[in-house]
Image: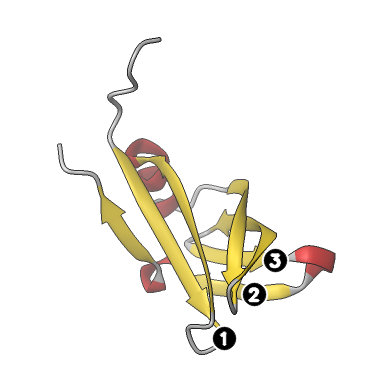
Amino acid sequence: MAMDNRPMIDITADWGGDDGYSTIRMRRSIWRKIQEGAYHERGAYSWYEGKRYPCRWVFSEGMVSITGPDDEDYLVEEPIGELIVEEDED
C-alpha cells in the first residue's frame, strides 16, 4: 500500500471548562479552504470526563460548530481561530 505524503494537520476544540474535547485530522489543503470560508462537515469522536462520544464537526464561513449525541451542542458557531491547530512537520 502506498504511503500518503500529503501534508496533514490536527485540529482540536475544547469546551466545558476543558472537560470535553475532540480532535480531527485533515489535509492541509482542506484546512486552507475552510479558512477561506468553505463548508466542510465530518464525523469524529469527542471525549468528555473520560468517556468517548460520537460527534459531528461543521465548518462554514469561518466558524465551527460541534454537536454530540442527540444533537447536543458542544460548540456553536465559534471562530475557527479559537481552534488548536498542529501541523505535521514536512
Rendered image: mark on residue 16: 1
Rendered image: mark on residue 74: 2
Disc 2, SS: strand
Category of crowding for the residue at label 2, using alpha-carbon neighbours closer than 10 angstroms: few (below 14), some (14–19), many (at least 20): many
Residue pictured at 63% horizontal, 74% vertical: 76
Residue 44, horizontal then vertical, whole percent: 61, 51
Pointer 1 with pointer 2, Cβ within 8 A: yes
Residue pictured at 40% horizontal, 57% vertical: 11
Give the mark nearest the N terminus, 1 or 3: 1
Give the mark nearest the N terminus, 1 or 2: 1
Distance from the alpha carbon under mark 1 to that under mark 2: 8 Å
Circle 3 sits on which residue?
Answer: 67
Category of crowding for the residue at label 1, using alpha-carbon neighbours closer than 10 angstroms: few (below 14), some (14–19), many (at least 20): few
Q: Quadrant of residue 83?
A: bottom left
> What colour scheme was applied to this rendering of the protein?
secondary structure
Residue sitting at the far top: 1
Residue 80, horizontal then vertical, whole percent: 43, 66
Name the foreground residue: 44 vs 35. 44
Distance from the alpha carbon under mark 2 to that under mark 3: 5 Å
Residue sitting at the far bottom: 17
